[in-house]
Image (cartoon, rainbow, N blue to C red):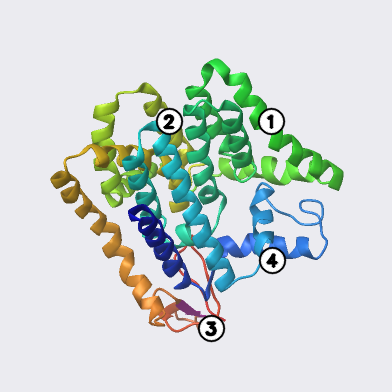
Amino acid sequence: MHRRAFWIGIGLLLLAARLCHWNVVWVEEGYPTAAALEMLRGKALYRDIWFDKPPLFPMLYLLWGAQAGVVLRVAGAAFGLLAAWAAARAARVFWGEREALWAAGLTAFFLTFDTPSAVMALTPDLLTVPLQFAAVGLAAGGLPLWAGVCAGLAVLFNAKGLLILAVCMVWQWRRAHVVATGFAAPVAVALGWMGWQGALPAFWQQVWVWGAGYSREMMFAQPWLEGARRTVNWGGFHAALLAGAGWAAWKERDWRWSVWLAVSLGAVFLGWRFFPRYYFHLLPVMVLLAARGWASLPKRWALAAALLLAIPLARFGPRYVALAQGKAWGIWRCTRARPGRRRSCGRAPGPAIRYWSGGTGRSCTA
């Protein structure tokens, strides 16, 4: 009964938070929605539609008919619940039931109280979170073939899924060939499908060639310094994870966790962009370590450490309340500047559907 109530609570949290955004469409989800709508009209991805992300990203949006509004937000809540479940399963493989509940709770919390453009929009970086939990958990549990399958599915959402494959092989280095076989299966199916559609050359150009060129363009004069600054900021915001993970690292002392952490941090730095959504590659390893740390702390210390969750809760909790009350927090209307005057922006209510750019943090309403 206790476990059932716990999972019902997680589901309600995820659903309530996302329904607050039912009338907002983020740019990051408008992109795959547009591609999915064209696919529903009979066009072939890459051959007839220019798209620079792997194929499962827009195809996922076909599951709910590329609809926005309530349907999209319910899908987001279901995804968050799936990620929490995958975290719990992985933690159970490594340790036990107590750590599993901590992992599920922390996953649901940080997929709610974080940068809205990152946690609300089902983007490639976010979509790999449950697959990373599952892949490494299966590898640690002695199922290398299925671990490879999960890594293969991840790379069909995000090219950085190749790094998940590397982490799986750390846990199953003696059976790396089995992991590679599992990885090849979904990738081969996807390549065969694109070849049958006549889209394979376009897929290579749009996803890999263009993507590599995009990654070479530097956004910052000193990318290492900018990356360090944003990572420190992320760590401060996720102090609850850092506290638990630090205690677990002291207790575990398993070199494979250090490798996983280093690979995940490399995924954040790859491309030198450091958008909030890139830090989702760091979330699974930090959540599992934090779950272990919090579960092994004395109850008094665990309750004290839980106060660190007030940082993200205070930062983003009030925004959900404002949205639920119909207030247009953070929505901006931009007006063109007259000759001799600067362009100005001011807060104003938007239309029924608001299009928001997570990259800039602002949106213009029509």
**Magenta extent:** 332-336
Residue holding disc 3: 351
Quadrant holding the N terminus: bottom left
* Front tag of 1 and 2: 1
Q: Amino acid at mark 2?
A: Trp
Is residue 333 covered in magenta?
yes
Tags 2 and 4 touching, CB below 8 Å: no
Q: Identify the residue shown where x is 47% and y is 81%.
A: 340
Mark 4 Cα shell of 10 Å, populated few (<14), some (14-19), many (≥20): some
Q: Which is more N-terminal, label 1 or label 3?
A: 1
239, 13: nearer the viewer:
13
Mark seen at residue 260: 2
Q: Amino acid at mark 1?
A: Ala
* Front tag of 3 and 2: 2
In 3D space, how far apart are the residues under numbered discs 3 and 2 (Cα atoms)?
44 Å
Relative image position of residue 101 (x, y in whole percent) = 35, 47
Q: Which is more N-terminal, label 3 or label 4?
A: 4
Q: Is residue 221 visible?
A: no
Q: Quadrant of residue 298?
A: top left
Q: Which is more N-terminal, label 4 or label 2?
A: 4
